[in-house]
């Protein structure tokens, strides 16, 4: 693990840029392997692959977090200390056995990267601070790096951050990143044109060179009213969680949209799509048995109705569930819940 005092946080244009800075530092220090959760988006591991590190998939628990047993087995197979990418998926935080395994791995030289993208609302104060160690900076007692894509939950179209770099190299802009910032600004002015935000996503998939967070967005996150805005967002999400509490929510109480596990998740997503809603997250193959609800009370009502046994049978009979039940990554978990939803 790094032996020097971590520098101040580095704010980047995107979370993947923050991970790229971690990947560069880890590679320079001799790290060659990354243990990553199987439930993830590809952008989380591409920065490490671009630096030549090998990525090993680790199975996840029903919460979406690394499964402690699978992580311990993956660690035992490593011939040198790896970097462990621990994502706080769906707003869930590590506790119990997973914390124990992570701490033991770190004590033997593994580096821990906490990806707090899905806990950015909960961790906003520590993620956004510029303070040095001991003066309100991010808590790195149990990790080497804390990173987040800030644009997913906070009110900016571009932004990421990394805490814990020992030798930070300031991100530099290039032509693609300049275009990215320009298109993001246009998309924000014309939010009624979804194709513009699609263009931002397309450019992000090309602009992998770390770039700094555009100044206007950094200033927005430092504005006096940001705390109240984030509090309102947390309150809305709490109401949404309460509205679907009777369903199998795998992230109860998280400052993140409720994620429902259901044997016919496809039918629920179909019902939402027909009402004009796009789920905020769906990683094909990794979250097929799950539904992340949009931040809207009407979406919660639709999900409750679509999850009901009668509605599901009718949808299947009419072919509205887009075919047979999807395979589930979390088989044991779903099986244990089937009696509630069958």
Image: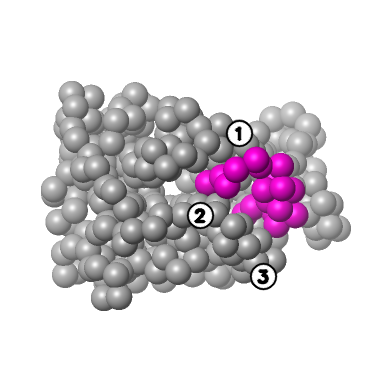
Rendered position, 331 above or below 105: above
Say whether disc 1 or disc 2 marks the residue closer to the N-terminus. 2
Q: Is residue 309 visible?
A: no
Q: Position of residue 268 (x, y in %)?
A: 64, 45
**Which dot, 1 or 2, sits closer to the camera?**
2
167 relative position to 215: left or right? right
102 relative position to 24: left or right? right
Q: Position of residue 232 (x, y in %)?
A: 34, 69
Name the residue beneath numbered marker 1: 284
User: Which stretch is magenta?
Assistant: 65-84
**Which dot, 1 or 3, sits closer to the camera?**
3
Q: Position of residue 218 (x, y in %)?
A: 19, 53
Rendered position, 30 above or below 249: above
243 relative position to 328: left or right? left
Q: Residue at x 57, y 62 (%)?
A: 107
Q: Is residue 11 visible?
A: yes
Q: On the image, which quarter does residue 199 sit in? A: top left
197 relative position to 317: left or right? left
Which structural element holds mark 1? loop
Rendered position, 194 above or below 96: above
Q: Residue at x 26, y 51 (%)?
A: 10
Q: Determine crowd level at label 3: few under 14, some 14-19, many 20+ residues with C-alpha closer than 10 A.
A: few
**Which dot, 3 or 2, sits closer to the camera?**
2
Q: Residue at x 55, y 52 (%)?
A: 110
Name the residue beneath numbered marker 3: 96
Q: Determine crowd level at label 2: few under 14, some 14-19, many 20+ residues with C-alpha closer than 10 A.
A: many
Which structural element holds mark 2? strand
Q: Is residue 76 magenta?
A: yes
């Amino acid at each position: 693990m790094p032996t020097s005092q971590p520098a101040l946080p580095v704010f980047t244009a995107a979370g993947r840029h923050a991970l790229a800075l971690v990947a560069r530092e880890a590679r320079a220090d001799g790290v060659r392997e990354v243990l990553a959760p199987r439930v993830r988006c590809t952008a989380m591991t591409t920065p490490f692959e671009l630096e030549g590190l090998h990525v090993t998939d680790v199975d996840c628990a029903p919460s979406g977090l690394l499964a402690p047993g699978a992580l311990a087995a993956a660690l035992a197979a490593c011939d040198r200390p790896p970097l462990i990418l621990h994502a706080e998926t769906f707003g869930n935080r590590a506790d119990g056995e997973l914390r124990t395994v992570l701490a033991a791995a770190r004590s033997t030289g593994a580096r821990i990267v906490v990806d707090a993208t899905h806990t950015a609302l909960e961790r906003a104060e520590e993620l956004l601070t510029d303070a040095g160690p001991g003066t309100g900076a991010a808590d790195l007692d149990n990790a080497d790096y804390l990173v987040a894509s800030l644009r997913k939950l906070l009110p900016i179209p571009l932004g990421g951050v990394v805490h814990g770099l020992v030798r930070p190299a300031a991100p530099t802009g290039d032509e693609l990143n300049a275009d990215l910032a320009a298109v993001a600004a246009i998309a924000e002015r014309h939010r009624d044109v979804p194709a513009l935000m699609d263009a931002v996503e397309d450019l992000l998939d090309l602009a992998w060179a770390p770039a700094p967070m555009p100044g206007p967005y950094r200033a927005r996150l430092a504005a006096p009213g940001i705390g109240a805005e984030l509090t309102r967002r947390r309150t809305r999400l709490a109401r949404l969680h309460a509205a679907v509490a009777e369903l199998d929510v795998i992230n109860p109480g998280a400052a993140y949209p409720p994620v429902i596990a259901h044997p016919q998740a496809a039918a629920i997503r179909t019902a939402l799509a027909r009402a004009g809603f796009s789920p905020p997250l769906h990683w094909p193959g990794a979250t097929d048995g799950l539904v992340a609800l949009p931040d809207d009370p009407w979406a919660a009502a639709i999900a409750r109705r679509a999850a009901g046994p009668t509605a599901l049978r009718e949808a299947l009979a009419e072919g509205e569930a887009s075919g047979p039940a999807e395979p589930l990554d979390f088989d044991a978990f779903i099986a244990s819940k089937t009696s509630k939803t069958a």
